[in-house]
Image (spheres, helix red, strand yellow):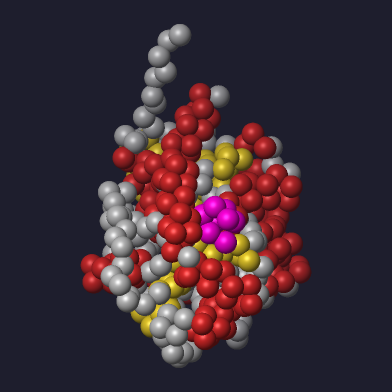
């Protein structure tokens, strides 16, 4: 049998925001993908298709709403700004005639002027997923009228139909593309994701905590209520009744969270800031378990980061969370908004160190096997190579 020949591709990576920055695009996912593809030997040029300066103002003004969040959602989902992003994409495509294939994050634009070059999408959600999450009150779809939602569905559908392949962050999302948009299953690939740390980062081995160290719970999420932070606070109060010295570290929210005995708010910590990064790593090292009782979560990379550090995880049994948190194996799953069940699972893990360590080891092994950017970019590259050959 002849040996397989690896094909090095010349890829143009397009995104809203700077794909070369860990904070610039897609919550750091774009940079992780770019770094992973380059590490595999592919040549990757990048382009930011977002609107800046006067162009951004002119695109946003016709979509004005006195409700700031609705205005923002309309700007990111409406056909007019999408068309302008497509024109920006065309300029990047023209500037890189040597590229063979285009990879972009999301479907907020179509890559215009690409000629014969195929394009592929990497997606962490879609409009139908957002629409399904509207009942939680935290999906951006709640900001759009039924007519606007229908228009976004049709605009996204056209972007999906034109793509040579769609890479999804989860199997849950893959099934949405197949059932909600009627996409050919062979065209939709679960690529997965990994922790948003540098590819060279190796987490330190966990060391036994000194005797008398307080039990510590870690929460990481920018949107405190969407991620179930208020549910965790109610459960944490019950935990403190049984284990008075327990600490809760809260990372992510930019505004202070409600004060509570034992709670330490660390604010928003940037991974590209050395001081913030050290504080974040210290939080992972000090924690005994990770808890994110999210209400609406298309994926949840924070779980993967916690698993990377060998922490048992508690999450909700919705969306793609069960693909990472395996109930009774790498942690526990609870229903959303169930503070009683959450308190029970927190106490179980805090009081049974052997169980917590077993879950943590299983989670770290699962993350190393299935959830790395190296594995994700290999799946993406293998499919794109095939699309070039077709």
Task: Give the quarter of the figure containing the C terminus.
Answer: top right
Q: Is residue 58 above or below residue 323?
A: below
> What type of secondary structure mainly makes up the magenta span?
loop
| Left or right of residue 339, residue 206 in this image | left
Tell me if residue 382 can be seen: yes
**Front residue of this view, candidates 193 and 33:** 193
User: Residue 90 in the image: x percent, y percent?
Assistant: 46, 48
| Left or right of residue 349, residue 73 in this image | right
Q: Is residue 96 magenta?
A: no
Residue at 40% x, 74% y is 216
Residue at 68% x, 47% y is 175
**Front residue of this view, candidates 233 and 166:** 233
Residue at 63% x, 72% y is 341
Q: Which residues are magenta?
A: 324-332
> Which residue is outermost to the right?
146
User: Residue 285 in the image: x percent, y percent?
Assistant: 32, 65
Asked where in the image residue 189 lies, by quadrant, the reply is: top right
């Amino acid at each position: 049998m002849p040996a397989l020949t690896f094909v090095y591709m010349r890829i143009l990576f397009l995104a809203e925001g700077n794909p070369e920055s860990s904070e610039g695009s897609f919550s750091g996912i774009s940079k992780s993908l770019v770094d992973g593809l380059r590490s595999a030997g592919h040549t990757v040029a990048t382009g930011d298709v977002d609107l800046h300066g006067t162009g951004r103002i002119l695109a946003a003004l016709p979509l004005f709403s006195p409700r700031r969040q609705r205005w923002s959602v309309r700007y990111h989902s409406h056909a007019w700004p999408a068309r302008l992003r497509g024109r920006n994409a065309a300029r990047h495509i023209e500037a890189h005639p040597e590229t063979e294939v285009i990879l972009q994050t999301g479907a907020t634009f179509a890559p215009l002027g690409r000629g014969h070059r195929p394009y592929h999408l990497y997606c962490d959600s879609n409009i139908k997923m957002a629409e399904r999450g509207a009942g939680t009150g935290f999906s951006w779809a709640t900001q759009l009228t039924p007519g606007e939602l229908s228009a976004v569905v049709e605009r996204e559908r056209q972007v999906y139909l034109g793509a040579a392949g769609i890479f999804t962050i989860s199997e849950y999302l893959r099934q949405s593309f197949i059932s909600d948009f009627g996409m050919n299953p062979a065209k939709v690939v679960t690529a997965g994701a990994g922790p948003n740390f540098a590819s060279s980062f190796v987490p330190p081995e966990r060391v036994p905590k000194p005797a008398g160290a307080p039990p510590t719970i870690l929460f990481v999420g920018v949107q405190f209520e969407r991620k179930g932070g208020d549910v965790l606070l109610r459960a944490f109060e019950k935990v403190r009744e049984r284990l008075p010295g327990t600490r809760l570290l809260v990372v992510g929210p930019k505004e202070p969270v409600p004060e509570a005995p034992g709670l330490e708010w660390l604010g928003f910590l940037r991974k590209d800031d050395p001081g913030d990064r050290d504080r974040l790593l210290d939080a992972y090292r000090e924690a005994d378990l990770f808890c994110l009782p999210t209400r609406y979560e298309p994926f949840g990379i924070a779980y993967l980061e916690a698993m990377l550090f060998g922490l048992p995880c508690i999450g909700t049994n919705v969306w793609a969370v069960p693909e990472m948190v395996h109930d009774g194996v790498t942690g526990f799953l609870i229903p959303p908004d169930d503070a009683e069940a959450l308190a029970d699972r927190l106490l179980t893990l805090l009081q049974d160190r052997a169980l917590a360590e077993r879950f943590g080891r299983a989670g770290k092994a699962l993350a190393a096997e299935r959830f790395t950017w190296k594995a994700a970019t290999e799946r993406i590259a293998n499919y794109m190579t095939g699309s070039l050959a077709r």
